Amino acid sequence: MLSSETRILTASQVRQKIKRMAFQLYENNFEEKQLILAGISPNGYVLAELLAAELRQIAAIDIVLLALHLDKNHTTQSHVALKGATVGFQQQCVVVVDDVVNSGKTLIYSLQPFLQQPIKKLQTAVLVRREHRNFPIHADYVGYALSTTIKQHVQVELQDTEKFGVYLY
């Protein structure tokens, strides 16, 4: 961790954002029998798990969790691996989940496996949206939009219960 951190979202604020995102996901997909949440590992998958838990509390919808693995430093050269339940995506609604969208590079490359099959709907969800996108990607569900300088870094902590929150460095 860097020395000058500023907490921009507390644990309760993060949980509130996740709950709101879950309601939005359900509102836009209430007619679906099944919803596939594909989280970009590691933090995007943890966020997908938290969203799935909230969705299960508010809706009688089957939630399938998948983990997307790719090399975020070499997205153009890496293969996107899917891990989790083995389901087909044909005519399914898929939501790709990540913790932060900055340039959009990771999010856009993570869509690759879903573009190779005739899916019904492809959506994206992020906890934090920064305003430095270089790729034509739009997050359908956003917990928190944040304007930062290009030199600042956003760290989302979803696994450490003491540090659970969003930080700006």
Image: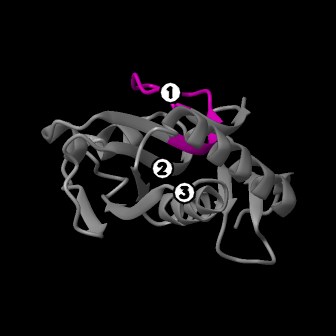
Work out which residue is located at the far bottom of the displayed protein and give it: 161
In percent of width and height, residue 106 lies at: 39, 44
Residue 128, image quadrant: top right
Give the amino acid at mark 3: Ala
Residue 147, image quadrant: top right
Q: How many marks?
A: 3
In percent of width and height, residue 40 lies at: 42, 57
Picture disc at residue 133: 1
Which residue corresponds to mark 2?
Answer: 97
Main SS of residues in magenta: loop
Question: Which numbered mark, 3 or 1, is in the foreground of this view?
Answer: 3
Sort mark 2 into few (<14), some (14-19) or many (20+) by Cα contacts within 10 Å.
Answer: many
For image coordinates 72% across by 51% down, the residue present is: 19
Which residue corresponds to mark 3?
Answer: 60
Q: Nearer the viewer, residue 107 or 18?
A: 18
Mark closer to the chain start, 1 or 2: 2
Give the amino acid at mark 2: Val
117 with respect to 139 (left or right):
left
